[in-house]
Amino acid sequence: MTLQPISFFSPDADLTKRRCPRVRAGDLGNAPLRSIGGGLLAQEVGPGVGEVEGRFEALCKGGLDPVVHDLLRDKTRRAHGRSTEPTAAVVDAQSVKTSANVAETSQGIDAGKKIKGRKRHLITDTLGLVLAVLITAANVHDTVGGKLLLDDLAAAHPGVTKVWADGGYQNSIFKHGAGLGIDVEVVHRPQTKGFEPLPKRWVIERTFGWQMQHRRLARDYDALPQRSRTMIH
């Protein structure tokens, strides 16, 4: 099955908008991309639900979802006057609840957050654009997921030499990062009263906020962690 050209890759596409541009109702090639980018119901696209799901599965199994995501991220970085390859990043994790269709073996309890579900481990660039994603059970420690993310980051973006993290990460992640040529630094909370954005780290908190604004990502509805990762892409 061959995917049709993706219409929103035109030079005039505005990637700063929160939702993907509208496409023709009968353009089946764009259907799965609307499902990913906008969190829209399959019925809104035009073709039958089965056709949309089939094309979406083909895109995921073919490994095209990270390719599409990376092209859009690079385009956005260029629009902000940045090189496509970042040199610094931010790491963090977020626990979210799951729906009833998620198997017990695929979720856990984050005792600190008192959430039963899954944990999204993310690394973003300094614009808040995703560089690496890992989905685990919520009881997996941030440090464990962070180490795996650093491995992926070093392989995909070898130019990154600095990563900022919060105080929840253990010392072992700093040693792991050093072995990869990455300086992992903790950004401490200010001692002042009231709300104050954390230096360097506020961008990834904003990314989590962007995700939670989409109803499709406010909870993990996918039976497979790989599918959850695709939805974030």
Image: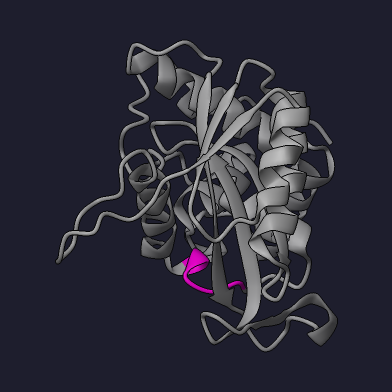
The secondary structure making up most of the magenta span is: loop
Q: Which residues are magenta?
A: 216-220
Residue 13 picture location, percent across and down: 37, 24
For the N terminus, give its image quadrant. top right
Q: On the rendered structure, is 214 left or right of 190? A: right
Residue in the foreground of this view, choosing between 122 and 46: 122
Residue plotted at (68% across, 56% down): 143
For the C terminus, give its image quadrant. top right
Residue plotted at (49% across, 58% down): 39
Residue plotted at (44% across, 57% down): 211
Q: Quadrant of residue 155?
A: top right
Relative to residue 208, is residue 67 depicted above or below?
above
Residue 102 picture location, percent across and down: 74, 81
Residue 27 picture location, percent across and down: 56, 39
Residue 171 visible, this angle: yes
Residue 219 covered by magenta stretch = yes
Residue 51 visible, this angle: no
Count of marks overlaid on the render:
0
Residue in the foreground of this view, choosing between 130 and 13: 130
Relative to residue 11, is residue 36 depicted above or below?
below
Residue plotted at (41% across, 31% down): 126
Q: On the rendered structure, is 217 left or right of 49? A: left
In this picture the colour scheme is one colour
Q: On the rendered structure, is 218 left or right of 184? A: left
